[in-house]
Image (cartoon, rainbow, N blue to C red):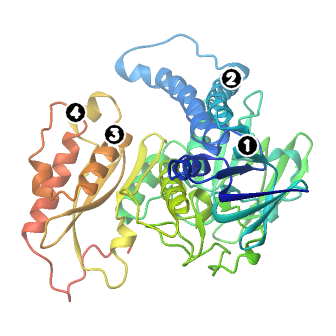
């Protein structure tokens, strides 16, 4: 058994782990990066990039379907499922290759391959070959998709998002369990590529939306295109030849049986902290078994252990994983000189069509007990000029501002070009701009961003009226 002593051990070589490694090394710390699976990051292998490749193919197919609305009539449309999936895998492998090449440039002495597990607060067992004595540790173990026990008997047709990009052809039919970001993105893409898709949602949520008005509009817009079944409970599944017989129960209690080629479990992801011997660290854990940590420093309690990325389950998106890894690695490298790092304004984007974006403080957060009342402004994109020009006039934007200061607090939206509008609003939020300052910014014509100005003007008017009497309930529906 080999024994090595290091300043910093990082468990996991994904986005957060790689960021932590670079930051720890900059601090002059002797650092080792431990990985128990293939190199390549969740984003490159099974997340951001392959999903966008699939969505790009779906967008191409949808543009042909939408063309007659402009008076353009293409010929017969043929979707070659094998070619679609071959391109997804080929380009995915290129992105993974870039990451693997980067890992290969890390000195071999700094890389360990094997599953890491705490045997004591400062000791890690890596596989059956190495014991690492570490002065500090960064947990960057990522997450894995939830697997519903009700689907355990469904056979090989029951898959998770990690599996979908290995399909060699498009199926005829697919059930998607969950209406979060992953389920909606992949399910809508499959639907636009000619797959019969049905969504099953235990509740009534869509993506990351919490604003009741935006959620209502999103339900209407996406429901006009997709078969979304809310208030449905998955009862079970069984292998049915080459497919899956799915059993569900609707809100009335009626049971339904339906056959699909595949059932995609997209009901969220679970942090990978259950098999790393966390019980040997002495850390205080929350109800999910995740160490309690300071989101400004990524330090677990007052200990020498830090956590970053999907493993902490705070904001499971790639930019956050990179930022958290940077903070955790830097603090582990210079420990005990622990300093707050830059945590950026929250920004989450679902690449559905229309796109969904949430920025800064969301509606539910702002409605939390003890929070002061906030003002709202909104715009519908149904009659917004550029949106109608593009035949993408669906959705709405709601923006939130702080009484007294006039500061812009956040927004939720579904609509055209939300990925770009989300960035503009996130920058304004992080800069702590007021609504008046935002309205002083340039708006060109005709652009979708003119809708942002309309919403901000409505928010400005609401702020000018002042906070309502506490006894008066406003915007009550759906709260």
Marks 3 and 1 close (CB-CB < 8 Å) = no
| Residue at the spot 64% in from the left edge and 72% down from the top edge | 290
Q: Nearer the viewer, mark 1 or mark 2?
A: 1
Q: Which mark is residue 384?
A: none
Q: Secondary structure at mark 1?
A: helix
Q: Nearer the viewer, residue 365 or 378?
A: 365
Q: Which residue is mark 3?
A: 420
Q: First in sequence: mark 1 or mark 2? A: 2
| Residue 270 visible, this angle | yes
Q: Earlier in the sequence, mark 4 or mark 1?
A: 1
Q: Earlier in the sequence, mark 4 or mark 3?
A: 3
Q: Secondary structure at mark 3?
A: helix
First of labels 2, 4 by sequence position = 2
Q: Nearer the viewer, mark 2 or mark 4?
A: 2
Task: List x then y, in percent, for residue 91.
Answer: 63, 24
Q: CA distance from mark 2 to mark 4?
A: 35 Å
Question: Which comes before the other along the chain, label 3 or label 1?
Answer: 1
Q: Is residue 335 left or right of residue 278?
A: left
In the picture of the structure, the residue carrying the numbered disc 2 is 90
Measure how far apart labels 2 and 3 are at the Cα level. Answer: 28 Å
Q: Distance between the Cα atoms at labels 4 and 1?
A: 53 Å
In this view, the mark in front (3 or 1): 1
| 433, 368: nearer the viewer | 433
On residue 109, the disc is 1
User: Image check: 262 left or right of 44?
Assistant: right
């Amino acid at each position: 058994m080999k024994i090595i002593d290091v300043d910093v051990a990082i468990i996991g070589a994904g986005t957060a782990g790689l960021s932590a490694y670079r930051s720890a090394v900059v601090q002059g710390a002797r650092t080792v990066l431990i990985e128990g699976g293939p190199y390549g990051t969740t984003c490159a292998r099974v997340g951001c990039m392959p999903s966008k490749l699939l969505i790009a193919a779906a967008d191409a197919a949808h543009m042909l379907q939408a063309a007659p609305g402009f008076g353009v009539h293409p010929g017969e449309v043929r979707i070659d499922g094998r070619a679609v999936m071959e391109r997804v895998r080929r380009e995915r492998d290129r992105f993974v290759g870039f990451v693997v090449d980067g890992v290969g440039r890390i000195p071999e002495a700094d890389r360990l391959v094997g599953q890491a597990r705490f045997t004591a607060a400062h000791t890690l067992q890596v596989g059956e070959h190495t014991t690492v004595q570490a002065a500090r540790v960064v947990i960057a173990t990522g997450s894995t998709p939830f697997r519903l026990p009700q689907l355990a008997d469904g056979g090989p047709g029951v898959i998770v998002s990690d599996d979908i990009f290995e399909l060699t052809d498009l199926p005829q039919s697919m059930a998607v369990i969950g209406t979060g970001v992953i389920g909606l993105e992949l399910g809508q893409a499959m639907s636009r590529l000619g797959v019969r898709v049905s969504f099953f949602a235990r509740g009534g949520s869509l993506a990351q939306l919490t604003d009741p008005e935006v959620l209502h509009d999103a339900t209407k817009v996406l429901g006009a295109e997709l078969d979304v079944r809310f208030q449905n409970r998955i009862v079970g599944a069984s292998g049915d030849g080459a497919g899956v017989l799915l059993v569900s129960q609707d809100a009335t209690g009626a049971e339904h049986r339906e056959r699909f080629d595949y059932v995609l479990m997209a009901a969220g992801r679970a942090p990978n902290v259950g098999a790393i011997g966390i019980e040997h660290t002495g850390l205080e854990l929350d109800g999910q078994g995740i160490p309690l940590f300071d989101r400004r420093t990524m330090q677990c309690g007052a200990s020498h252990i830090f956590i970053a990325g999907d493993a902490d389950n705070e904001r499971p998106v790639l930019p956050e994983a990179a930022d958290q890894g940077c903070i955790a690695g830097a603090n582990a490298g210079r420990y005990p000189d622990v300093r707050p790092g830059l945590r950026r304004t929250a920004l989450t984007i679902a690449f559905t069509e229309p796109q969904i974006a949430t920025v800064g403080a969301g509606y539910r957060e702002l409605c939390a007990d003890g929070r002061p009342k906030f003002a709202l402004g909104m715009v519908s994109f149904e009659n917004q000029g550029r949106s109608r020009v593009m035949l993408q006039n669906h959705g709405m934007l709601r923006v939130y501002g702080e009484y007294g200061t006039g500061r812009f607090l956040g927004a939720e939206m579904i609509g055209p070009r939300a990925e770009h509008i989300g960035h503009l609003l996130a920058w304004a939020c992080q800069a702590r701009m007021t609504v008046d300052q935002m309205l002083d910014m340039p708006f060109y014509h005709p652009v979708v961003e003119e809708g942002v100005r309309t919403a901000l003007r409505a928010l400005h008017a609401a702020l000018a009226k002042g906070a309502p009497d506490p006894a008066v309930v406003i915007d009550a529906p759906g709260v």
